[in-house]
Amino acid sequence: MIPADFPLLRGLPTDDEQTSPGGQWGRHGPTREWDADRFPLDLVTCDNAGLPDGLPDVADTLYAAWYDVASAHDRQLMVFASADEARTWAESVSSAFSCERETEGDVTVFYEPYSERSKSADLVQAWVTRHELQGRPGPAGVVHVVVKERAVLLSKFYAGEGSQVDREESARMQDRQFNRIAAVVNAM
């Protein structure tokens, strides 16, 4: 069981850093109960397929997030029955991001994989989903999946509308987001 006071909010902005004060903005959690209708945790994957069916069951989950009108940080810490099940779940995310790009109309989405090394984790995977609108840089997001023994951290960041993220900036964005979750990974 994950302790209720696990530091899942570490590295996220504080409520004072939000640009739009109000009910849904700022920090949320950590909590075991999550309003998925209000704050969806779905992954935007190749063909919008999501994760495959038949994945191992999660034994325990803790959620935390920080939202602002311009960006979103979602975190989900899961514990599985075994380290093998945790790795299986994490590898399914990798297969869901296996395409390099998708184009629909004027929008091209690039799925750029990154690898990170961590002395305190068994496996770290990362992807930047970068949008181009009519060939110009647009919004982007970063997904990290970190496995440590039976635990899996799923961390998502989205730089919303108005952001312009090119390939060079996406690498810096991935590094910044990995640094934001480092304290959580160390505590896993």
Image (spheres, rainbow, N blue to C red):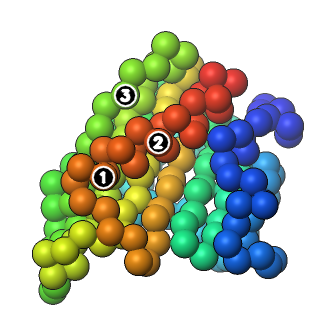
Give how far across and how far down residue 155 sits, in percent. Answer: 53, 47
Seen at 40% across and 48% down, the residue is: 173
Amino acid type, callout 1: Glu
Question: In front: 79, or 130?
Answer: 130
Query: Which of 121/78 is in front?
Result: 121
Q: Which residue is mark 3?
A: 116
Identity, as a three-letter code, of the amino acid under mark 2: Arg
Contact between labelled residues 2 and 3, with CB atoms less than 8 Å apart: no
The answer to whether residue 141 is above or below residue 11 is: below
On screen, residue 169 versus residue 120, left or right, reads left
Specify few, some or many for label 3: CA neighbours under 10 Å numbering under 14, 14-19, or 20 or more.
few
| Residue 123 can be seen, yes or no | yes
Seen in the picture, residue 69 relative to 111 is either above or below; the reply is below
Amino acid type indicated by mark 3: Glu
**Circle 1 — which element?**
helix
Label 3 secondary element: loop
Spatial CA distance of label 3 from label 2 is 12 Å
Q: Compared with residue 143, is residue 10 higher up or lower down, i.e. above or below? A: above
Q: Which mark is residue 169?
A: 1
The part of the image, by quadrant, that contains residue 61 is: top right
Q: Nearer the viewer, mark 3 or mark 2?
A: 2
Q: Earlier in the sequence, mark 2 or mark 1?
A: 1
**Comes first in the chain, label 3 or label 2:** 3
Check disc 2 and report the residue beneath it: 176
- Of callouts 1 and 3, which one flags the residue occurring earlier in the amino acid sequence? 3
Image quarter where the N terminus lies is: top right
Residue under the point 39% across and 70% down: 163
On the image, which quarter does residue 104 sit in? bottom left
Q: Is residue 86 left or right of residue 59?
A: left
Which mark lies nearer to you, 1 or 3? 1
Mark 2: which secondary structure?
helix
Give me the C-alpha separation between circle 2 and circle 1: 10 Å
